[in-house]
């Protein structure tokens, strides 16, 4: 590093990456220094502002205008047109740069700060969840990315409404030569999802490779298909209102106005990121893992391995048919570690049971066995004797009617969209409810489906259902139903507060949303459920409800941090979880993403990623691009006509692409399969070799080709023989050996 004339002309280097910051505070060079000649990735026409400031009222970004670097302190001082001065600490580590905002002056109108945009010339894969630009070609093999180093720094942009990016398609081809765009499309073009906006399967409507579904905006593309990345941090201590929907472009999911709860002390000062560049082939296990460990980021493990390590990817068993005599044995023989008790239905958070989901004496026995039904705790102990954990499917933070915090006595810590005042006293039987201001009260339910049955207000301890508000004064709620969800109709006085509650969606997910403090308690509740009942797995359906309070990915990070912290205090070392979505807020904590299932995800018969919809292709592209295990959903049930060859193929794809899945196991169906034992053996053989990290990177590329067939045989604990099977005939064996060093 060096400074010229008191202005920053700063060169920073890691073992793989060198950047140059100019006198204005822009990155003007990003080079791969892991091999010569050094390749430049900073576009000449798009220098990258190190740190931008954002004024939400004016909807205006301020880029730095002048930079001064102090070599002694490692502090970069940035000056802006609005008079603000930012001090950014820069630390060059062995494998990444650590950037931290230490202070900002003249900040009263600055709502948010943004790291970047950092522009690259990379046009291959964009990791929109964690913020990475990847060129996976053999010729280039390089990636540039970022990670947040604190909870209030989020993947995405300062302009992201509700701090959760829109769920939509963009146009981007990962390879312009192989997949040239049609003349009617251009890079970065936005398209809405498919279907009616309610059916989640129908969202996935484009099988063409240039339709890229987006689960974040930490990476985006410009008009030339070049990828740029950003993170941001918000001042959450102030009042604000957002007009939020996760799917704003669909009529069924139009936004609602939400008064976002202020969170004192949660600010952008201290916002910190890791900026890194490295060969893509080693980025996950050599660089990202290094950042996670050194910076104390969440690091869940399974079988002693980080859950992001491809050698740790392992499918789970999924119960079906609610007869569980053999599922523990099946799971053990398959080499799996977890049973999802999916056929038990939803687990609804109810703090009233204090985590005893089967009663304080475990008197409820919902797990069906021929020898006699058992509680979750008893079944978990049976599974634990084989080194297996069990789990359930909760509906995340949906507080359902009849649970402690919802009804018949609702909590005073519920999240609300709007707050109004009652203009006239009402008795328990009155249905004329006059409000001081009708603004936004015409909106129905939440953004997600606008469920009419969930459109309610809370006054005191009473829930009141309504639909609509009068157009003329005195403004009154229309179609009123008192004492909703079995709450008690009561007298309410002039000046009492009316809360229009934030809610979920119907279809069995019906519930109200907690405010942030109550959400913290719900997170702890889920940890207690694990500790008391022996659970160590969750499938968080309705995971998007964590966004409904307007705090987006921050809310998600906070929820899972609270859950994992309480679990650790209770002695629960690991909670494996999947869920309805994947976000920058959950990436570190979430082990897998086996959402959906069947032929929508991967069709083993036609050998394609989603034969019914594009869901398999879409979610594969998202997860793979973000260094996350690809999910095949709940899939591949063993039935009477199942064959060994089918599961050789499934396992080859799983290892080659880097996937997990939930194997549907219905005891009656499994026992009807003549090849049951051989199928178990095949799956176990592949899983043993995967856990041994016996597959090279080049071999995985071959296994990922659905057109190819394979057979794997285990020679001993450390060696395998992999046979290509062209036309069903054994080819020459490829010898595989356990990776003793544990490399990748």
Image (tube, rainbow, N blue to C red):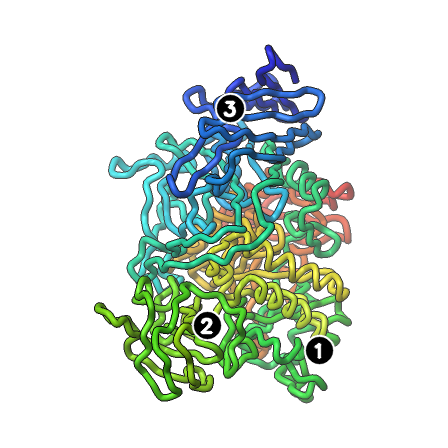
Q: Is residue 22 visible?
A: yes
Image quarter of the N terminus: top right
Residue found 46% across the figure and 40% down from its top? 109
Image location (x, y in percent) of residue 386: 75, 69
Residue 292 against residue 543 in the figure, above or below? above
Which residue is denoted by mark 3 in the rendering? Answer: 26
Q: CA distance from mark 1 to mark 3?
A: 57 Å
Secondary structure state at the residue bearing disc 3: strand
In this picture, residue 191 sits left or right of residue 720 = left
Secondary structure state at the residue bearing disc 2: loop
Which residue is denoted by mark 1 in the rendering? Answer: 377
In this picture, residue 307 sits left or right of residue 207 = right
The answer to which of marks 1 and 2 sits earlier in the sequence is 1
Image location (x, y in percent) of residue 94: 70, 29
Image location (x, y in percent) of residue 97: 64, 31
Residue found 39% across the figure and 65% down from its top? 446
Residue farthest to the top, as pictured:
5
């Amino acid at each position: 590093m060096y400074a010229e004339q008191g202005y920053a002309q700063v060169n920073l280097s890691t073992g793989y990456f060198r950047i140059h910051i100019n006198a204005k505070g822009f990155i003007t060079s990003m080079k791969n220094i892991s091999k010569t000649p050094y390749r430049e990735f900073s576009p000449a026409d798009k220098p990258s502002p190190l740190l931008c400031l954002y004024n939400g009222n004016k909807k205006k970004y301020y880029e730095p205008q002048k930079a001064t670097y102090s070599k002694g302190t490692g502090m970069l001082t940035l000056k802006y047109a609005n008079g603000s001065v930012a001090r950014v600490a820069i630390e060059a580590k062995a494998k990444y740069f650590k950037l931290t905002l230490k202070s900002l002056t003249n900040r009263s109108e600055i709502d948010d700060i943004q790291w970047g945009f950092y522009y690259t010339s990379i046009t291959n894969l964009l990791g929109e969840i964690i913020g990475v630009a990847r060129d996976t070609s053999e010729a280039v093999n390089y990636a540039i990315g970022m990670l947040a180093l604190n909870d209030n720094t989020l993947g995405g942009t300062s302009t992201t409404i509700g701090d959760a990016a829109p769920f939509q398609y963009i146009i981007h081809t990962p390879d312009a030569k192989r997949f040239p765009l049609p003349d009617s499309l251009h890079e970065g073009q936005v398209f809405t999802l498919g279907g009616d906006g309610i059916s989640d399967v129908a969202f996935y409507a484009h099988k063409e490779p240039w339709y890229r579904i987006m689960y974040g905006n930490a990476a985006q593309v410009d008009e030339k298909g070049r990828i740029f990345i950003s993170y941001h941090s918000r001042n959450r201590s102030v009042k604000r209102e957002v007009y939020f929907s996760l799917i704003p472009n669909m009529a069924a999911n139009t936004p609602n106005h939400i008064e976002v709860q202020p969170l004192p002390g949660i600010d952008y000062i201290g916002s910190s990121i890791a900026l890194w560049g490295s060969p893509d082939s080693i980025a996950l296990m050599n660089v990202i893992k290094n950042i996670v460990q050194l910076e104390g980021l969440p690091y869940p493990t399974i079988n002693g391995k980080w859950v992001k390590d491809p050698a740790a990817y392992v499918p789970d068993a999924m119960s079906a048919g609610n007869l569980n005599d053999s599922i523990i044995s099946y799971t053990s023989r398959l080499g799996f570690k977890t049973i999802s008790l999916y056929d038990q239905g939803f687990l609804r958070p109810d703090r009233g049971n204090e985590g005893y989901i089967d009663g304080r004496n475990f008197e409820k026995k919902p797990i069906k066995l021929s020898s006699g039904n058992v509680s979750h705790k008893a079944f978990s102990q049976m599974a634990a004797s084989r080194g297996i954990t069990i789990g359930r499917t909760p509906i995340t933070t949906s507080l359902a009617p009849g649970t402690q915090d919802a009804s018949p006595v609702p909590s005073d810590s519920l999240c609300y969209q709007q707050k109004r005042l009652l203009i006239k006293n009402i008795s328990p039987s009155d249905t004329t409810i006059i409000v001081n201001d009708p603004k936004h009260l015409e909106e129905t339910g939440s953004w997600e489906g606008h469920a009419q049955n969930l459109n309610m207000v809370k006054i005191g301890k009473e829930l009141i259902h309504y639909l609509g508000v009068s157009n003329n004064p005195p403004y009154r709620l229309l179609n009123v139903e008192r004492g909703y969800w079995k709450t008690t109709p009561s007298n309410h006085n002039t000046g009492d507060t009316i809360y229009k509650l934030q809610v979920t969606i119907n279809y069995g997910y019906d519930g109200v949303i907690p405010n942030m403090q109550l959400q913290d308690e719900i997170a702890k509740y889920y940890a207690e459920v694990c500790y008391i009942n022996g659970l160590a797995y969750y499938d968080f359906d309705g995971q998007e409800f964590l966004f409904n309070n307007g705090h987006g990915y921050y809310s998600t990070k906070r929820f899972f941090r609270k859950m994992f912290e309480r679990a650790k205090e209770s002695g629960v070392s690991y909670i494996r979880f999947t869920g309805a979505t994947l976000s920058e807020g959950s990436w570190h904590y979430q082990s897998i993403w086996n959402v959906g299932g069947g032929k929508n995800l991967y069709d083993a018969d036609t050998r394609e990623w989603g034969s019914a919809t594009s869901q398999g292709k879409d979610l594969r592209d998202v997860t793979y691009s973000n260094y996350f295990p690809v999910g095949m959903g709940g899939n591949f049930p063993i039935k009477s006509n199942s064959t060994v060859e089918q599961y050789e193929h499934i396992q080859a794809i799983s290892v080659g692409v880097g996937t997990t899945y939930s194997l549907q196991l219905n005891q009656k169906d499994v026992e009807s399969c003549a090849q049951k034992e051989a199928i178990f053996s095949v799956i176990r053989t592949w899983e043993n070799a995967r856990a041994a990290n016996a597959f090279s990177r080049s071999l995985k590329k071959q296994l990922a080709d659905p057109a190819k067939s394979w057979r794997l045989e285990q020679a001993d604990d450390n060696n395998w023989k992999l046979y290509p099977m062209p036309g069903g005939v054994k080819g020459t064996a490829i010898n595989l050996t356990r990776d003793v060093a544990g490399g990748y």
